[in-house]
Image (cartoon, rainbow, N blue to C red):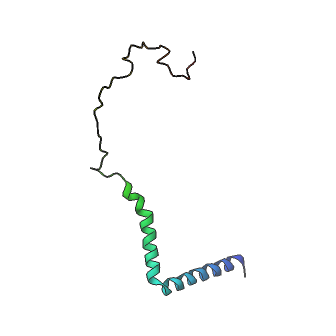
Amino acid sequence: MTLTERLRERISRAFYSHGLLCASYPIPIILFTALCILACCSPLLKLPLPGTGPVEFSTPLKDYAPPGEQGAQPGEPGERPDWVSV
């Protein structure tokens, strides 16, 4: 037997045994296949669809002052980050 014939024989045996398995247990095979399909398609449920955009909420803050209005001039040492050493 050549390598090609042996390979063909092994492949045909594998398909035959797989067919016997599917014919012997049809309902569990169908359920397993359906579960695999659902597991593969579950990331599609997380896709953003039109009309399901993010919702923005804004809450007012009391006594808020933007940074830089406390009297510090631009470039003062108090305004620079600590890692800047100029």
Instruction: Name the residue rendered at 45%, 73% in the picture.
Output: 33
* Lateral position of residue 65 relative to residue 16, left or right: left
User: Picture quarter containing residue 84?
Assistant: top right
Residue 69 in percent (x, y) is at 36, 17
Along the line of sight, the residue nearer the viewer: 64 or 25: 64
Residue 16 in percent (x, y) is at 56, 84
**Is the N terminus in the top left, top right, bottom left or bottom right quadrant?**
bottom right
Instruction: Name the residue rendered at 41%, 67% in the picture.
Output: 38
Residue 14 in percent (x, y) is at 60, 80
Along the line of sight, the residue nearer the viewer: 8 or 46: 46
Reply above or below: 60 against 10.
Answer: above
Instruction: Name the residue rendered at 32%, 26% in the picture.
Output: 64
User: Picture quarter containing residue 6?
Assistant: bottom right
* Lateral position of residue 70 relative to residue 56, left or right: right
Along the line of sight, the residue nearer the viewer: 27 or 61: 61
- Total of numbered circles in the picture? 0
The residue lying furthest to the right in this view is 1
Reply above or below: 32 against 53.
Answer: below
* Lateral position of residue 19 relative to residue 50, left or right: right
The residue lying furthest to the front in this view is 63
Residue 12 in percent (x, y) is at 60, 81
Reply above or below: 30 against 86.
Answer: below
**Is the C terminus in the top left, top right, bottom left or bottom right quadrant?**
top right
Instruction: Name the residue rendered at 30%, 47% in the picture.
Output: 53
